[in-house]
Amino acid sequence: MMGVRPPFLPLKGGGREPKARGWAADNDVRCNRRTVLSGGGMMLAASLLGCQKTGSLSGPSASGRLPEMRIGGIPAAFNAAEHPFRLGDNSAATPAWLYGDAPFPVYRMRLGESLDVTLTNRLTEHTSIHWHGVRGPNAMDGVPYVTQLPVQPGESFNYRFTPPDAGTYFFHPHCDTAAQLGRGLAGVLIVDDESTAFDDDIVCVLKDWRVAKDGSFLPFVTTEGAGRGGTFGTLRTVNGLVAPNIAVPAGADIRVRLLNVDSTRVSDFGVQGAQGLVLAIDGNPVQPFALDTWRLGPAMRMDIALRTPQAGGRIVLTDFFAAEPVTLATLVAAGAPKRGDAFAPVALSTPKRAEPDLANAEGHELKLSASAAATDYPAPASIQLADGRRIDLLDSLCSTAQTLWAIDGKTWPQMGHENLPPPLMSFTRGTSVRIELANTTPHVHPMHLHGHSFKVLSASKLKRPVHWADTVLVMPDERVEIAFVADNPGNWMIHCHIVEHQDTGMMGWFRVV
Ligand SMILES: [Cu+2]
């Protein structure tokens, strides 16, 4: 059924290329011509294609797979808009904010192809798109007041760049993130290389929702949550479904891409029913190693390879963090076995990336701490955008009235709650940098750095191999050392990805000139 063929699109029907289809002929809407894939086949996803489809109540596919589309080299239109859909067994629909009419659309492109996405804001507040983990140009990084001005309701913004690395990425807004991401505003970007072939390639997006049984949203930020480990969702989902069953080919080598897009929850991810091999962390290839469990914090991703069992067999994707393991999703094998050889997937190809010169690196310690008051700087510095405009102030969607957390003793925003802080660090382009992240709090902080991948060199508590990442979990009272070459010019954010921590001060920026 599912042929071995790059670029790994999970197609039924002997692996034929899907036919491009012009939706305009079928629907009374104006749409782009685009190939749309959903797990086993074609699906209508009008608003995913930038078409307006009003009054629809669609949502996750019962197959458990996310809608997939190719966008490499093709202009694409994303509409950020409210699209209600029903979650779990709630009595009514949830007024989700989505980039299409189903949660977490998956956009695929091949390495070397260009991305050309026009975001149109049909929300009631400003937004933007940050391409998490992509080492793109600064002007395309999607951080309001730091790399671009906010995209106001009714406005559009064109993101155009060529991602330099293959990998599993996601995208999301960067102001009022607790509410916007909390309402579902996130999508998946996959840049495929063709170095390996799997029989199937499955995307699993982990996200909890803060919803009541009537489908309405509960407050995304609570004082108790923001001041501790974050406010947890009330409904856990994978691909928008509660513990879905996902059909997979039997006796096959499959690639599973896990993305934790939750604002708060750290999962201790593992599998039952098969031996998992870790292929990549945050999209960065590793020499494959056996998966025991892996702490997957907010914004972290991992790609694993699995050999599926015979027809009828099951593999349970499990969160072992709690006392009682939680089933996230179940892969159910079907069909004739694909392979009879030994399970030995080859490593993904290593990206072209500068190795930091550790012996001569510039060292910094960044303390992660609690902070009751916003920092007061004597001489605030303005931020210069790529187009030359200078920004001194931000607005309330991108700041907070309540500062609870700090990096290096400094908060975002600074005193006055509208003033942008000066950079935490400034590097000449090409500098090798070593940063020690020192967590002085009793909570975990998944720390994310924009515009660069970094090497996780060592950690004082949680054992993990040396690997490249864009987000690293820093455990309570832990010291984690990372290193990278500051080779991407611009203004880059560094922040905690527990979104309430980010939104209440644990955010800063650094400059590469
Ligand atoms: Cu944090």
Image: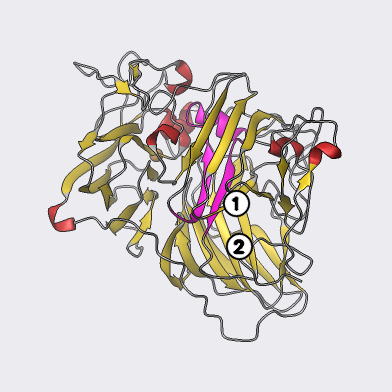
Q: Is residue 193 above or below residue 152?
A: below
Is the distance from the Cβ of mark 2 to the nearest ligand 1 atom less than 8 Å? no
Q: Amino acid at mark 1?
A: Arg
What label sits on residue 357 in the rendered view? none
Q: Which residue is nearer to you in this view: 12 or 297?
A: 12
Residues packed near mark 1 inside 10 Å, few (<14), some (14 to 19) or many (20 plus): many
Residue 310, quarter of picture? bottom right
Name the residue located 75 percent from the left edge and 76 percent from the top edge: 311
Residues packed near mark 2 inside 10 Å, few (<14), some (14 to 19) or many (20 plus): some
Residue 262 visible, this orientation: no
Residue 126 magenta: no
Instruction: Give ligand 1's quarter of the image.
Output: top left
What percent of the width, then of the height, locates residue 42?
Answer: 78, 52
Residue 171 magenta: yes
Quadrant of the image for the C terminus? Answer: top left
Q: Is residue 229 above or below residue 199?
A: above
The residue indicated by pointer 2 is: 7
What label sits on residue 108 in the rendered view? 1
CA–CA distance in space, label 1 to label 2: 9 Å
Residue 319, quarter of picture? bottom right
What percent of the width, then of the height, locates residue 144?
Answer: 44, 25
**How many marks overall?**
2
Residue 371, quarter of picture? top left
Residue 3 visible, this orientation: yes
Tag 1–tag 2 contact (CB < 8 Å): yes
| 208 sits left or right of 24 in the view | left
Which span is picked out in magenta?
A: 165-192
| 317 sits left or right of 498 in the view | right
Q: Which residue is nearer to you in this view: 240 or 102?
A: 102
What percent of the width, then of the height, locates residue 191?
Answer: 53, 54
Helix, strand or loop for disc 2 = loop
Q: Amino acid at mark 2?
A: Pro
